Image (cartoon, grey):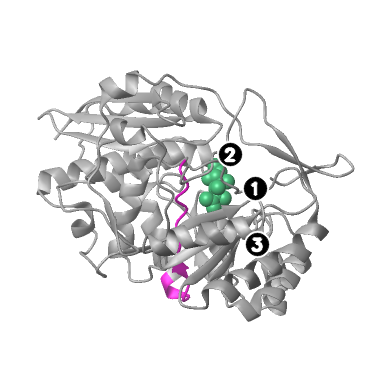
Amino acid sequence: MKIVDAKVIVTCPGRNYVTLKITTEDGLTGVGDATLNGRELAVASYLSEHVCPLLIGRDAHRIEDTWHYLYKGAYWRRGPVTMTAIAAVDIALWDIKGKVAGLPVYQLLGGAARAGVTVYGHASGGDVPEALDDVARFLDAGYRAVRVQAAVPGLDKTYGIRSGSSLTYEPAAGVRPAEDVWDTGAYLDFVPTVMGAVRDRYGFGFQLLHDVHHRLTPIEAGRLGRSLEPYRVFWIEDPTPAEDQAAFRLIRQHTTTPIAVGEVFNSIWDCQQLITERLIDYIRTSVSHTGGITHLRRVFGLAELYGVRTGSHGATDLSPVCLAAALHVDMAVPNFGIQEYMSHLDPAGDVFPHHYSFSDGLMHPGDVPGLGVDIDEDQAAKYPYDPKYLPVNRLRDGTMYDW
Ligand code: GCO
Ligand code: MG
């Protein structure tokens, strides 16, 4: 079944998304998410200049072969741009295979290993009372797991805080990155008070998560983990910049709080040591930044051998196509842990009609053949690309820091 067309669609329904649409000779189409937040056009160009021409005439059924053709064939391996581009092709080909088979993709991956996918929502607040009220919003909506972030007193801006009544927060903005100021001491003193307040108010009957966003040193992360032990958090996420995998040994020596890492990883090699040395508890790689369903399954397979569970990145900069693909993988893998879920901003739903659903804390990818998500090109054309950047961080003395 030959591929006859491969095209890249860039659209901004609420935020920027890059989508690859592949068409076969018998008129079937598949979609893949190629969005790399703040660097969208690099992947769009990698695809349209270097990958789409190679796809024409290839057999759409040969997913594994195409993956290696693009990975090994480029000579230049790994990296977020390359791996997101390969992912988009891979996701689109799984979509097509599902449509040919007449089955939802999770059935092709081994079938349902659970009734649904437990997701966590994002509660946040400009102060502790606001964050507490926001937690209620998620618990009332049926969530069984909630991530909580609150603005650190004394800082003008804190990562992960929602503004207005939106269900999500929007970190990317402006034609140049905004510059935030970071203070580790203030943060480390504050977070235990937030988590303690959440448990005091709502008890222990749901999972409580927190994202550190790569801002600590290993010994500081050890201190944070230990200070949160009384509140039995499900995980602390990205405690340190994870290029340094061996550094996690130090965190492990100091705390039993579970550790989750991986949203900026793009290959199995980025987390090999973390997994095989059992330095983390959850691997957070995503379908669209980690080489697609084919490569993500390999990462999760390695993780399973070492008792590491999955917890895929699912922020709104990953498009509904990525979320659908993630839900199919989550349904089928034996070592599923949890899935991040931030509902997309309007009007993303009009551009990406989809069949996944949320009920009672669980999501389900739906049972239509393929991924169950599509792109409406007429709708997409209404929302032209709008360049935006993630913020950067500086310490109080002006030193560039990790965002
Ligand atoms: C998360 C992430 C996001 C990232 C964003 C970057 O846990 O959801 O940390 O908020 O910052 O996806 O593009
Ligand atoms: Mg994160």
Range of the magenta residues? 304-316
At label 1, which amino acid type do we have? Tyr
Label located before the other in sequence (2 or 3): 2
Where residue 151 sits in the image (x, y, percent)?
68, 52
To which residue does mark 3 refer? 245
Within 10 Å of disc 3 (Cα), the crowding (few <14, some 14-19, many 20+) is some
Q: Nearer the viewer, mark 3 or mark 1?
A: 1
Classified by dominant secondary structure, the portion drawn in magenta counts as loop
| Mark 2 C-beta closer than 8 Å to ligand 1 | yes
Residue 159 bears which disc, if any?
A: 1
Pick whichever, 49 or 185, lies toward us.
Answer: 185
Where residue 20 sits in the image (x, y, percent)?
33, 31
Compute the Cα span from label 3 to label 1. 23 Å
Q: Is residue 281 above or below residue 358?
A: below
Where residue 215 sits in the image (x, y, percent)?
72, 54
Pick whichever, 61 or 339, lies toward us.
Answer: 339
At label 3, which amino acid type do we have? Gln
Query: Could you tell me which residue is drawn at 56 percent across and 45 percent down?
Result: 162
Query: Could you tell me which residue is drawn at 54 percent across and 59 percent down?
Result: 133
Label located before the other in sequence (2 or 1): 1
Where residue 108 sits in the image (x, y, percent)?
19, 57
Element class at badge 3: helix
To which residue does mark 2 refer? 171
Confirm or deny contact between disc 2 and disc 1 (CB under 8 A): yes
Confirm or deny contact between disc 3 and disc 1 (CB under 8 A): no
Label located before the other in sequence (3 or 1): 1
On whether residue 80 falls in the magenta region, the answer is no
Q: Is residue 361 above or below residue 182?
A: below
Confirm or deny contact between disc 2 and disc 3 (CB under 8 A): no
Pick whichever, 53 or 254, lies toward us.
Answer: 254
